[in-house]
Image (cartoon, rainbow, N blue to C red):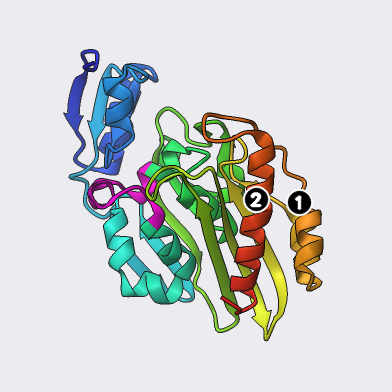
Amino acid sequence: MKPAAFAYAKARSVDDAIRLLGTHQGEAKLLAGGQSLIATLNMRLSHPSLLVDINGVAGLDGVSVKDGTVEIGAMTRHVTLERSSDIAKHAPLIARAMPHIAHPAIRNRGTIGGSVAYADPAAELPACLVALDAEIEIAGKGGKRAVKAGDFFKGLFETALGAHDVLTAIRFPAAGAGTRVGFAELARRHGDYAMVGLAAVAKANGKSLSDVRLIYFGVGETPVRVRKAEDALARGSIDDAVKALDLDPPSDIQATAEVKKHLAGVLLRRVAKQLMGDA
């Protein structure tokens, strides 16, 4: 199947992209890496009247670390994050997640901003950003604003982005000396969307943990934080953390709800060991 007809425009700047989005009454879409959009266009699940290409907009890509904050431009390709020494050092959770995202051909083209804006509930990066308590910068007609990742994801493929908004950057605290991260997912084949996945961040003093953040993906319409399990793990008990999981995942083509609940516990045990320095 081929996409329905649409117009195409190449934005010269962020402001130009915002202007172009405003010319088609909410029926325009941004083209970044295109790894999700092109597929939905071809299946006619998306049928915009205009595609606004932001690949030529300067200043939207790259990784920087300044004053204890990591900033990633929205147009930064997955492969850049995968190979970045700054990401490996200052954002180890992102570094752990990158090899699980699809396949090399897709990582060569896909962007972090595109993945976050698409908001697939089984995707790795949205959960990582919630775990990192990231801030997402959005430019719109009223100027720029920042939205916490925990507030950005609103529902199934639904975010805080308005029809005329452009996601421009992502920021989060750089990992410190006591930062521990954990990441694991279970998929039918490597590179497939996860049946269940877990991204985690904590502060560690030996095997003692504090400020634990456990964020599941693939188990709800958005990334899901499990606060009771976090509290139990901070008290030092992996068994209690597993018992405290209060997930209610839907059944889907990947697995039943019962299987997802079981896999969530399996992943929690694996990730807890990573956080405690045992793996």
How many dots with numbers? 2
Under tag 1, what secondary structure? loop
Mark-to-mark CA distance, 2 and 1: 8 Å
Q: Is residue 214 visible?
A: no
The foreground one among 50 and 181 is 181
Q: Residue 223, relative to residue 141: is it above or below? A: below
Q: Residue 23, relative to residue 237: is it above or below? A: above
Q: Residue 272, relative to residue 6: is it above or below? A: below
Q: Is residue 122 left or right of residue 52?
A: right
Q: Position of residue 65 (x, y in %)?
A: 39, 72
Residue at which label 1 appears:
245
Given the image, on which type of amino acid does mark 2 rest?
Answer: Ala
Q: Is residue 28 visible?
A: yes
Which region shows up in magenta? 100-114
Q: Residue at x 58, y 74 (%)?
A: 180
Looking at the figure, which quarter contains the C terminus?
A: bottom right
Q: Residue at x 74, y 61 (%)?
A: 230
Q: Quadrant of residue 25?
A: top left
Q: Position of residue 99 (x, y in %)?
A: 37, 59
Q: What is the chief secondary structure element of the magenta stretch?
A: helix
Residue at which label 2 appears:
264
Q: Position of residue 275 (x, y in %)?
A: 62, 72
Cβ atoms at labels 2 and 1 below 8 Å apart: yes
Nearest to N terminus: mark 2 or mark 1: 1
Q: Residue at x 47, y 50 (%)?
A: 124
Q: Is residue 54 left or right of residue 196?
A: left
The foreground one among 258 and 246 is 258
The foreground one among 34 and 161 is 34
Label 2: few (<14), some (14–19) or many (≥20) C-alpha neighbours in 10 Å: many
Given the image, on which type of amino acid does mark 1 rest?
Answer: Leu
Q: Residue at x 26, y 53 (%)?
A: 104
